[in-house]
Amino acid sequence: MRTGRRLALAASVLALLAGEAFGQVGKPRIVTPDAKAVSAAYKMAESVFDQLKAGKNEDLAKWLTDQIGFAWDASKKVQNTSEYKTKLDMIMLSPPSGNYGKLSGYDLIEESYLPGSDRYFRFTYISYHEAAPLVWEFRFYIKPDGKVSLNSFGWSDKNPFEYLSTGDMQLLRWYGR
């Protein structure tokens, strides 16, 4: 009976070691996008905040729709441009009419790259308004021709610490960056 336990223990240890070895082989490599692409993305994000601060919500809504909705049909573009403008206008409403108000500044709080890809990455910013902060997420894609495009865009009124603790925001910790 002791021999059976020893064999079971040895088999368990070997299975754990083999699993660890295979797990190491399967991890994606950490790569980063080209510095020129990242610089272009920074300029895009800064432009969003500059337009927001200047009250150019209609221009910003059109640009966002062009970037994200390049494949949408004309009616969907009109609808989404209108929705973006309305939401941006609501953000900029000063209290008590709105929850945020005039933009006074912003900071980059997280920059991450999709493990295994040097063509998809994300910037997370926090913007400071007269009443409360907002967290903004920009996801960029480097097209096959090398041009950077805004692939996804959004904001969250969650507490920034709560937002940064979500699973996808912790992705790079998992991959050991």
Image: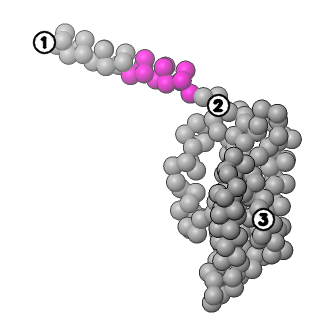
Q: Which residue is mark 2?
A: 116
Residue count near mark 3 (Cα–Cα under 10 Å), binned few <14, some 14–19, many ≥20? many
Which badge, 2 or 3, comes first in the chain's sequence? Answer: 3
- Total numbered circles: 3
Quadrant housing residue 101: bottom right
Q: What separation in Å lies between label 1 and label 3 (alpha carbons)?
A: 75 Å
Q: Residue at x 42, y 21 (%)?
A: 19
| Image vertical order of residue 34 relative to residue 75, above or below | above
Residue count near mark 1 (Cα–Cα under 10 Å), binned few <14, some 14–19, many ≥20? few
Name the foreground residue: 82 vs 118: 82
Q: Which residue is mark 3?
A: 60
Comparing labels 1 and 2, the label whose residue is closer to the camera: 2
**Residue 119: where, in percent of width, then height?**
72, 36
Type of amino acid under label 2:
Gly
Give left or right: position of 80 versus 17.
Answer: right
Q: What separation in Å lies between label 2 and label 3 (alpha carbons)?
A: 32 Å
Give left or right: position of 166 versus 177.
Answer: left
Give left or right: position of 154 versus 60.
Answer: left
**Residue 88: where, in percent of width, then height?**
69, 71
